[in-house]
Amino acid sequence: MDIRVRTDFRPATEGYKQVRRNANRALKDGVVAAGEKAVLPTAKRYAPKRTGKLAASLVVRKGTGNRAYLTSGARLREARIAGLHEFDNTINKRIEPRRKWSKGTKRTRRSALLINGRFVSQVTKPRHYRAQLYMTRAAEARRDEFADALVPSILATFREAGFEVSR
């Protein structure tokens, strides 16, 4: 005697896949929103003041899975400045005036740069930048607030899917 039982779990499996897809999407959006709400204001406060528009250029973007990145939205020069302030770095490139010779002279006097209160014709020594870790410190300081801001978006996803959720 041969007994065969055929069960079809496809509807339940499809339902779980849909819930998981929605939960991942909500987590991604929630991480970015929670970062903007909890971490971004603190990072702007911690940003170095002498860098001009650096604090204004900070944004939370690129939510991928369960991560979001606090980064500078600045371009080129300003983005390099943000990186120098966040991480330790040494620059060895030589700094020279844009004009090699002063205007109005017949190549008798070189143009000069004002570096640390002194006029010099070029800077050849490496410049060391100490890490200030303002973005990292902001993320660590606001970790609990970040989690509290993230939880409601995830719970709402499961509530919409029909699960009983309590917090």
Image (cartoon, rainbow, N blue to C red):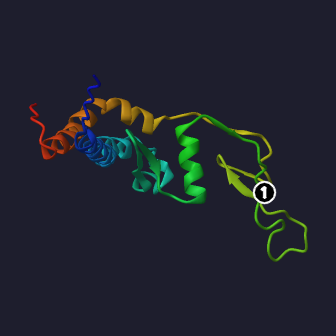
Q: Residue furthest bottom?
A: 104
Residue 106 is situated, as x and y percent measured from the top left of the image, at 90, 74
Residue beneath the point at 24% across and 35% down: 7
Residue 22 versus residue 27: which sits nearer the camera? Answer: 22
Left of 26 or right of it: where is 54?
Answer: right
Residue beneath the point at 18% across and 40% down: 158
Residue pointed to by mark 1: 96
Residue 51 is situated, as x and y percent measured from the top left of the image, at 50, 51
Q: Residue furthest front?
A: 1
Q: Quadrant of residue 105?
A: bottom right
Q: Quadrant of the N terminus?
A: top left
Q: Residue furthest top?
A: 1
Q: How many marks?
A: 1
Secondary structure, mark 1, is loop
Q: Quadrant of residue 83?
A: top right
Residue 138 is situated, as x and y percent measured from the top left of the image, at 37, 36
Residue beneath the point at 44% across and 56% down: 57
Q: Quadrant of the C terminus?
A: top left
Q: Amino acid at mark 1?
A: Glu
Is 121 drawn above or below residue 98 in the view shown?
Answer: above
